[in-house]
Image: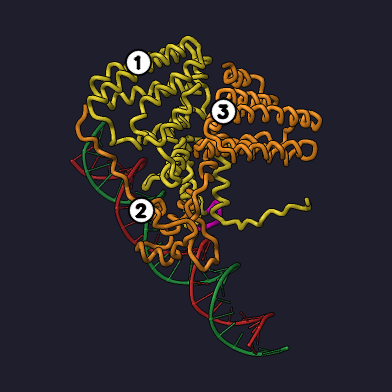
Chain colours: A orange, B yellow, C green, D red
Amino acid sequence: MGGPRFEPVRTIRAYERIVEQVEGAIESGTLTPGQRLPSERDLMAQFSVSRSTVREALRVLQARGFVQSRPGDPNGAEVLPFSPAALHRSMTTLARVDELSLGELVQFRMVLDASANLLAARLRTEEQLAEMDAAIDRMRKAAEVSYDEFSAADVAFHDAVARASRNKLIQISTEVVRSIVVNLIAGKLASSDDRVALMRRSIRHHEEVLDAVRAGDGALAARLSRETMYDYYLDYVPADERPALRALLED
Amino acid sequence: MGGPRFEPVRTIRAYERIVEQVEGAIESGTLTPGQRLPSERDLMAQFSVSRSTVREALRVLQARGFVQSRPGDPNGAEVLPFSPAALHRSMTTLARVDELSLGELVQFRMVLDASANLLAARLRTEEQLAEMDAAIDRMRKAAEVSYDEFSAADVAFHDAVARASRNKLIQISTEVVRSIVVNLIAGKLASSDDRVALMRRSIRHHEEVLDAVRAGDGALAARLSRETMYDYYLDYVPADERPALRALLED
DNA sequence: CTAGTGCACTGGTCTGACCAGTAGGCTGCA
DNA sequence: TGCAGCCTACTGGTCAGACCAGTGCACTAG
């Protein structure tokens, strides 16, 4: 056992070196979002490689969400601000390829949203409470009019809570998982009558959650938010997956 | 309001069409992991494009974790089984670029691990309990000998719990976030004496968690697991981030 | 039957070229 | 003088053809 642990000799492909350098420059702040990379022809001179190699590197950087190029642009590729787009893509792929069920996704949302509420109850500012108030108000006004607007207001509420948790990871994951769930159930919405009833119930639930957050009762806020989400998505989740969701409710 | 909602005309770059087609074939199961793509020269014939275009498409597919190519391989690029590697990368980038703090990461781990324990307490099989037992046993044996082996056993325990939660998303996120945390604190480990004390305490904590899981007491298992992790990482987390962690403890 | 040697193929890289776009300067008209 | 419109010098996207260092397999010589 032990002995020198040799690392496998990694063949260094030229385009990978370029990717590393550019990525490093972005992560270290040498290159900041909005700045432009030199043109491909300049880069091939700077790196002493051919344009194909430069372009392969740029494709990788683009796939990772670091840069974007536009044909005809007299400047080079643009350095992008970080966005969870790449994270979003890989999670979406996961949902498509890796047999991720709606039940698992909703369960994960319940976990995230509950912790966001728990933290928000303890850490929220008055301003954030006002945001949540405003979001519920929007939900009330939209409920009888437009389901899309209701949905948007609902999203705004959950976003406000996520922000109040002061945890970026919770914020971003919430956002990513939510959009996947919404995409999955899009098209198989409940009938119009059911929908109105659902929205009304949902508003009441959100009010209760907000009360708990306002009161600083994290445990209650977490429990209520789980119940809210369970209630809201129950009809979309296949019967055999529901027990797993219920397992998150019994406290 | 309303009116026809025109989508922006997306310029269709040739290599993107190739990426779409191959990705579609993989997601639909036409191409399964382990299978080989035709060689680049075959692909250029099949898609009626030049090799550079084929290669740019392959670079993107590789960056997204779908395929991998090896020089000299008489077969073409290999279709990879899905792995959270891409997810891992984007999250790591997030941690580096987007000022994600250790506190936030540990907090997220506490959330994930707690829910995994909560679910495991209700859904675990006897077999999985045995796995957890075995992992704690390994931790006991390693504690006085090797910190690395202790760590590995610790990981095995948490993995077993995550599997028992029956939620792949929790499993994968746990895995990804853990490795980022471990990387972040690598090198600034506590002193050797402290370490042994820490390991002993950690074992006791894990035993308590396992007892709760075995007893089916999800709420207790969740609370204990949060406390365990808080205790274990406290020293690495800057003082000003600790209140946020404690906010997760008060139930 | 096996050790060793080619050979045909792979991916990685390079060169040089053309095209359709874009932006900004220039020209010429009002 | 002011501005509309053209021109040019760039950009990224694509193509064609070439070379190289590896790899695996078939074939061959012992």
Q: Chain of mark 1?
A: B
Q: Quadrant of residue A228?
A: top right
Q: Chain of mark 3?
A: A
Q: In the image, what residue occupies the spot 58% across and 42% down? A: B24
Q: CA distance from mark 2 to mark 3?
A: 51 Å
Q: Is residue B159 above or below residue A80?
A: above
- Can you say which quadrant of the picture contains the N terminus of chain A? top left
- Can you say which quadrant of the picture contains the C terminus of chain A? top right
Residue B231 appears anywhere in the view: yes
Instruction: Give the x, y percent position of residue B216.
Output: 50, 11
Instruction: Give the x, y percent position of residue B85.
Output: 44, 38
Q: Chain of mark 2?
A: A
Q: CA distance from mark 3 to mark 1?
A: 32 Å
User: Disc 2 or 3, which lies upstream in sequence?
Assistant: 2
The circle drawn on residue A216 is 3
Would you say A239 lies left or right of A164 here? right
Q: Which residue is mark 2?
A: A17
Q: Quadrant of residue B103?
A: top left
Q: Which residue is mark 1?
A: B204
